[in-house]
Image (cartoon, coloured by chain):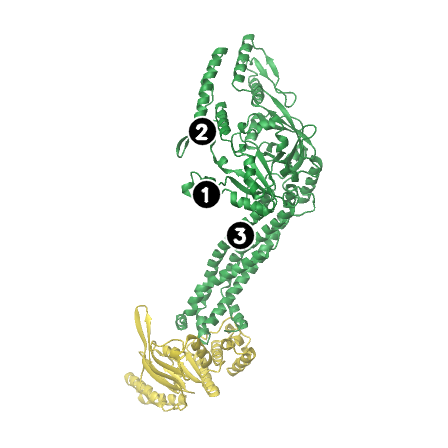
Amino acid sequence: MPKQIDKKIWAEQLLAAFDGNIDAAIDALRQAESAVKQARKPKVMPTGPVLVSVENLSKKYKVGRQHVQALNSVSLDIHEGEFVAFTGPSGSGKSTLLQLIGGLDKPSEGTITVDGKNLTKLSDRHLSKFRNQTIGFVFQFFYLQPFLRLETNLEVPGMFARTKRRERTQTAAELADAVGLKDRLRHLPKELSGGQMQRAAIARALLNRPKLILADEPTGNLDSTNGTAIIDLFEQVRKDFGTTIIIVTHDPKVAAHADREIVLEDGEIKL
Amino acid sequence: MITIRDTLTLSLTKLRTRKIRLIITVVVSGLLFTALIAGSLIFRGAFASIKSFGEEGLGKRFVVTGYDTSASSENLFAKPEILNRAREIQKDLIARKKAEAKKLNIEYSEQSEPPVINEYDTPNGKEQSVNGETSAGKQAIAEYLQKNPPRSSEDFKKLAEPYGAFATYSSRYAPYTREGSMQVLKDGKESYDLANNNTKQQYGPPRGVDSFLGSWSLMSADLLQPFAIKGQSLKSGNDGSIPVIIPVSAAEELLNLKALPGTASSADKLARTKELRQKATDVRFNVCHRNAASSALISNAISTQQEIERNKKNKDYVKPDLIYGLPKEPCTAAPVIRDVRSADQKKRDAKQEQFDQMFGQQAPSQSAISFRIVGLTPDYEFQSAIGIGQIIGSTVGSSIGTGWFTPLEESVKNPIIASYFDTNNTIGSGQIPTQYAEFHTSAQAKKFIDEKSCQPNYMNPEVQKDPFKECREKEQLYSLNAFGSNSLALDAAKKQFSKFFTIAALVVAAIGSIIMMGTVGRMIADSRRETAVFRAIGAKRMDIAQIYILYTFIVSLLISGFAVLGGVIAALVAQDRYADGLTVQALVAYNAQDLSRTFSLFQLYVPDILLLVGLSLGVSLISISIPLLRNVRRNPIRDMRDDT
């Protein structure tokens, strides 16, 4: 398991290196980090068909009078059933990449193909349908509707999909059960803990059985226990539904759970 | 597109955000619409009631009143030719007086003559006007009017006949300036409080017998007939009494009935109306007319008495040689109570009298005119504030108006009244008779008004000096209006109300729109993050628009519901507060024989309500359009970023 490999390497490197010399310890840590990365790569090599294909993707923003190059000629493939983590410092372009894959924004250059659809060529209407049917979004701040009971909150993507009421109510109940919130269906979001709200958000993202879940800092607003539980839940979702998962995270421990970590820096993938 | 049910689920969540602001919006906008709905219910109810009551007045007749605008706007007093003629007459008069005084060997100074021309300052400089109280001034105006007579009843008839008028009538209001005095003799007694009487003559207190001079009109009997109490004739009686319709307060005073307090219940007022109709009918009373010389003797008698009283203890005081006393019998000549003049003095006084009479001064005369009560009119109410009751009340009172009415044809048979209302003796707007034309149908009357009524253009600065120029060019010489709460008058009132209602509705809509735009715009702005999340999970722009449009629709329904409820409550309150009083007022004003008729201030007029509800909805949708368009066009990412 990736978690065990990471811990072992880290522990070995640290113990071997630390003899009271701080500089040596820092070097050891850097080596450990590199070792971790190396250790990850061959973990589970993607074998399924490509779900997400990004080619020469660039994105420029205009902030005030200045142009910011958020992404610069990024190319990558993500396979079905893969669990990928985008990491990197703030402003490195990881969230931008996630949003472009999710069809929330248009690239300045390059193409994004998700589930065989070239997003750059889809109309706004079709992009909405694509987001509704193919993508499940999970946000750092959950974004549940505060005045709707949990059961209705989970059904919202089904409303936009015009799924029959009975069908989506049943699916919502099953998903609430799957994320451990069966007994909270009649509650309002304010009556739930942070961890419960994020689990609810994951259940909502799954309602239309998307092929891809895009999670932006899903543990960023949770304590470590709840954060771990959410990552475990993502693992479970992948296992149970075969959903491809892409998360953006700053947390190395979260990234360590992924099959693959893609590190971005200054809008480019760091090799 | 999401289903209506799901849209409703999501829209209702919006009602739970910013509750205080939403409540303020609903209440403020709702109150504005409440006023309009209440106005609609109340006025539509009032119109229906007036129509119902009018069936007993002039409601089934189509009468148009015409007032000669060009004559009324003409300032005779400042006309140069009249000014010049007055000067000439005055000059000649002084010369003749000087000669006659010399001949009679009496003293005469032209300084004793009142000025025939008055000069006064105006913003445009000094202006002159003829003194209409001087004999030279009167003569100059009379000569002018003889050469340029005002349009007559015949002229009006010729104008109205082509439109289908089958009868014409006229009325004359009591003149503003008059010679001598007229006084209603209450309990047959004459009051000698002349100073007070003169004031009354000038301004006319609005209630009781004192209102006589200020509100006395002569009107064609055909127009007055519907307002006579059942069975009463508008012909003069065998005793020569002139029929008169008088205000309720005057009837109460003449019958020595104590006026009901303002707080009296409607039942009491109704009972009083019945009582007055029974008791006042056929009651006779006299009005005393004294000419200027007779009034002057009464004044002289009073002032001499006062002078003697003041000098009671003054041993040096010498009483006048000739003293007049107050008459023992009402409306008789002032008696001489002391005359110790010498033979020479008497001779001089006789010469002076001869001189005065030679130059137009009349010998003292007084006589009583007998009137007979045949009907009642509501009293004129002074309004210190404008309220629903007052506005409707003034409409109700407009059946023939308030005041004293005597039939024109019978009145002018009386030489005193004829002289009193004589054009040559009555300078001012009172000299111009009001004309009336009666038509078979409302359409005929309306066409006559539409085509021949003068609408002076006061707004155009170019014609401000002569606002009637355009009217004269179009041969629109009269200001024409529907008269007597007939269906035409009612239509005109309804039209005016609809116009006012539409303008008020648009103003309210504009204000409501601004309020709504603030609230809905703020709510949409506050919901940007939520919109972004919905977009992220698959909502189309149309889905988002649908949610906010339904939200706005719900808000406008809340406003409409509040307004309808508020309007109904307000109308019912008005009904409770004013309807009974108006019922009594209308019973008198329309001389209703059926005393069970009631006046209502509540009638549901569905088009008005639909208009307002539609307007509320329209306003809401207009107010949401800009913020909504802005919102759905936004990039959801930016909104999510702004939040984090």
Display colour for chain A: yellow
Helix, strand or loop at mark 1: loop
Mark 2 belongs to which amino acid?
Answer: Ser
Do residues under tags 1 and 3 come within 8 Å of each other at their CB atoms? no
Q: Residue at point 47% right, 62% down?
A: B622
Circle 2 chain: B
Residue B587 in percent (x, y) is at 66, 43
Circle 1 chain: B
Give the chain letter for green. Answer: B
Mark 1 vs mark 3, CA separation in Å: 24 Å
Mark 1 vs mark 2, CA separation in Å: 26 Å
Q: Nearer the viewer, mark 1 or mark 2?
A: 1
Position of B441 with respect to B519 (left or right) is right
Label 2 sits on residue: B129
Q: Nearer the viewer, mark 1 or mark 3?
A: 1
Label 3 sits on residue: B501
Residue B78 in percent (x, y) is at 44, 30
Label 1 sits on residue: B457
Q: Earlier in the sequence, mark 1 or mark 3?
A: 1
Residue B316 in percent (x, y) is at 53, 12
Q: Nearer the viewer, residue B532 or B223?
A: B223
Position of A261 with respect to B583 (left or right) is left
Quarter of image, res B247:
top right
Mark 3 belongs to which amino acid?
Answer: Phe
